Structures are given as C-alpha cells and as structure tokens.
Image (cartoon, rainbow, N blue to C red):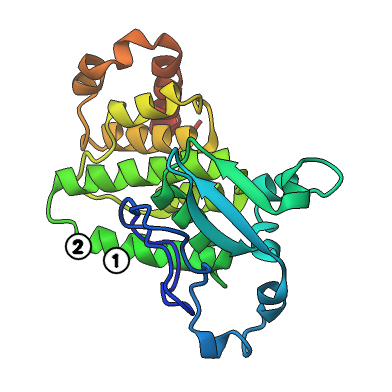
C-alpha cells in the first residue's frame, strides 16, 4: 500500500512512504497536515507535545514526530515510558533494522485523523487500478506486508484494518490468493493469525466456486503443510454443508 494517510504536506516537507528515503540529513517534522490546519485541528494538542527523534536504519536517518502522536502506537508508548527505558528520557528511539519507508507508513497512520477509513479508500482505489492478476497478487503482498509491519509495532487498529479489507472485499473470477501468500505469513510467524484465517476462508470459497485450482495450491507447497491442508478442508466443508 503506497499511502495510508490522507495527505503528505507539512510545514517543511514530510517523509515519503512510496520508496526508500535517501539519508540527506535530518528530515523535517513529520505531519500530514498543512501548517495553517494545525491550529484548527481537533488533534492540535498532540502538535504541542515534545518532539521525538527516530533514528531509522543502519544509516541512522532522522525522522522527527510529536510524542503524543507516537503514544497512540503501543510500541512507542512502551519505549517512551519515562520510568522504563532510556528512550523515555532522551526522546530518541533507535530503529537500526527498520526501513525508512516502513517507518513513514507507521507515522502516516498515527497522524491520520481517520486512518482506517483512509486505508480502505486507498486499497479500493488501488484495486480498481489493477489491470491484471499479477497486480492483484502484488496488492495482496502489500496487505500482508502491512499486517506484519503493524503487528511488529503493536498497531492493533492497523492489523484489524488489513483483515477487514480481506474479509469484506469481493474477488469475482480471480485466483488472487496463492499459497505463497499463506507461506509468507507462516514464515514470519503469523500462521493462525486473523489474517491467516481470513485468507484461508478466501481460498476455501474460491475453491468451492471453482475459481481457484486446489491442485495448483498443492503443487505450490500446501501438500507439505498437513495442518494447513486439514484446516482448508474444514473451511471448504463449512461452505459446502453450512457447518
């Protein structure tokens, strides 16, 4: 998903989430709202809070954000406890293993006034622009990446938004769900997660409707995962017999 927020303008230029950010020095304060909107926003209190510096990636690229905005994310709320970790005193958080574009995506979420609504809107726009099956598969890859990222930073609202998109979206005449997508979740430790269950339900429904070939799934690796295969059969039986 290239954008989870409603805008990218700020007082001095916001970080972009659509690609790697080159470390050309400290970035300006991250905010998706224009300067003249800060004083009118119902969220204006958070813009008066302390500034936290995020040192992202091995190059220690600096991203700056308001503390009250970061506190809406459980991961940062834990880091910024003044009686707990050093980060709570220094207002500086080191994220050496993170990618700048991933962190920009998290910041877009915590700054957006309606992140769930914005996320759904962007997904629908991207889906309508898909011109073939491969682009739809890539879009699902993006959803999975967002789910893993949100889980890492304990953004429950974002993980729920991803699952909701998968469960509510209708996918006629498409085999957009592949076993590789479930394999990605499994390899990242998210087997049996809410997204895993949602995708398994999608697969079961597509197979029952003969819009997905079970043999292809078996050849792609499902046959080697007996637990997943057993669960898939159970979901298929539920669709067939209403169980």
Q: Residue at x 35, y 54 (%)?
A: 21
* Residue 179 point in image, percent of width and height: 30, 26
Residue 66 in view of the camera: yes
> Could you tell whether 219 is left or right of 20 in the image?
left
For numbered disc 2, what is the local secondary structure?
helix
Numbered circle sitting on residue 64: none
Numbered circle sitting on residue 129: 2
Q: Residue at x 49, y 42 (%)?
A: 149
> Which quadrant of the structure image shows residue 58?
top left
Residue 242 in view of the camera: no
* Residue 15 point in image, percent of width and height: 42, 63
- Camera-side residue of 1 and 225: 1
Judged from this view, the residue extending furthest toward the front is 25
Q: Residue at x 29, y 27 (%)?
A: 180
135 shown above or below 185: below
> Could you tell whether 156 is left or right of 164 in the image?
right
> Could you tell whether 39 is left or right of 239 in the image?
right
179 shown above or below 54: above
* Residue 176 point in image, percent of width and height: 24, 41
Residue bearing mark 1? 125
Q: Residues within 10 Å of mark 2 (few under 14, many from 20)?
A: few
Judged from this view, the residue extending furthest toward the right is 83
Judged from this view, the residue extending furthest toward the left is 132
How far separated are the C-alphas under marks 1 and 2?
6 Å
* Residue 119 point in image, percent of width and height: 44, 62
For numbered disc 1, what is the local secondary structure?
helix
Q: Residues within 10 Å of mark 1 (few under 14, many from 20)?
A: few
Q: Residue at x 49, y 63 (%)?
A: 108
168 shown above or below 187: below
Q: Are marks 1 and 2 in contact (CB under 8 Å)?
A: yes
């Amino acid at each position: 998903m290239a954008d989870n927020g409603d805008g990218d303008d700020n007082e001095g230029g916001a970080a972009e989430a659509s690609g790697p950010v080159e470390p050309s020095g400290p970035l300006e304060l991250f905010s998706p709202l224009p300067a003249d909107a800060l004083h009118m926003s119902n969220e204006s209190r958070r813009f008066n809070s302390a500034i936290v510096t995020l040192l992202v990636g091995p190059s220690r690229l600096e991203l700056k954000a308001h503390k009250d905005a970061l506190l809406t994310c459980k991961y940062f709320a834990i880091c910024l406890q003044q009686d707990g970790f050093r980060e709570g005193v220094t207002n500086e958080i080191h994220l050496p293993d993170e990618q700048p574009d991933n962190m920009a995506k998290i910041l877009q979420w915590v700054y957006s006034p309606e992140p769930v609504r914005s996320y759904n809107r962007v997904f629908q726009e991207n889906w309508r622009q898909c011109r073939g099956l491969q682009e739809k598969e890539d879009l699902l890859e993006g959803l999975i990446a967002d789910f893993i990222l949100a889980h890492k930073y304990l953004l429950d609202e974002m993980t729920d938004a991803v699952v909701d998109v998968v469960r509510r979206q209708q996918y006629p005449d498409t085999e957009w769900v592949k076993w590789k997508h479930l394999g990605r979740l499994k390899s990242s430790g998210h087997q049996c997660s809410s997204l895993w269950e949602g995708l398994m339900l999608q697969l079961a429904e597509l197979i029952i409707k003969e819009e997905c070939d079970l043999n292809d799934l078996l050849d792609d690796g499902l046959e080697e995962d007996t637990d997943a295969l057993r669960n898939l059969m159970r979901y298929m039986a539920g669709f067939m017999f209403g169980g």
